């Protein structure tokens, strides 16, 4: 996300309502890390999920850059 956006550790992440499948305001997770990327133009934000991922039936994932050390 752009570095100009304000993100705080502990902030809740909710669905936006822009999807036809997921209504606005559903809990996605909580920000556990927010740091500038190498370019210092974007923020890398890590979110702890609000639910056990093994219990999900559906998910909408937005692909992005992979961090080193992750599959």
Image (cartoon, rainbow, N blue to C red):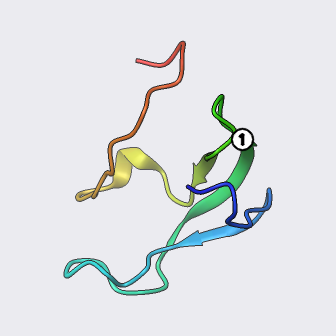
Please count the marks in the image: 1
Relative to 16, 34 lies left or right: right
Horizontal and vertical percent position of residue 4 = 69, 63
Query: Which one is in front, 10 or 52?
Result: 10
* Quadrant in the picture for residue 31: bottom right
Query: Which one is in front, 1 or 13?
Result: 1
Q: Residue furthest left?
A: 20
Above or below, comparing residue 14 to residue 8 in the picture: below
Horizontal and vertical percent position of residue 60 = 27, 58
Query: Which one is in front, 10 or 37?
Result: 37
* Quadrant in the picture for residue 8: bottom right
Relative to 47, 28 lies left or right: left
Q: Secondary structure at mark 1?
A: strand
Horizontal and vertical percent position of residue 29 = 58, 61
Above or below, comparing residue 27 to residue 58 in the picture: below
Q: Residues within 10 Å of mark 1 (few under 14, many from 20)?
A: some
Q: Residue at x 28, y 57 (%)?
A: 59
Above or below, comparing residue 51 to residue 66 in the picture: below
Query: Which one is in front, 9 or 59?
Result: 9
Q: Which residue is mark 1?
A: 36
Horizontal and vertical percent position of residue 10 = 79, 61
Q: Residue furthest top?
A: 69
Q: Residue at x 45, y 26 (%)?
A: 66
Quarter of the picture containing the N terminus is: bottom right
Q: Residue at x 54, y 15 (%)?
A: 68
Q: Residue at x 21, y 78 (%)?
A: 21
Relative to 50, 71 lies left or right: left
Quarter of the picture containing the C terminus is: top left
Relative to 16, 14 lies left or right: right
């Amino acid at each position: 996300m752009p570095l100009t956006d304000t993100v705080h550790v502990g902030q809740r992440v909710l669905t936006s309502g822009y999807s036809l499948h997921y209504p606005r305001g559903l809990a996605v997770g909580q920000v556990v890390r927010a740091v500038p990327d190498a370019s210092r133009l974007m923020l890398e934000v890590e979110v702890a999920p609000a639910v056990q991922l093994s219990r999900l039936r559906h998910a909408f994932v937005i692909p992005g850059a992979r961090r080193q050390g992750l599959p």
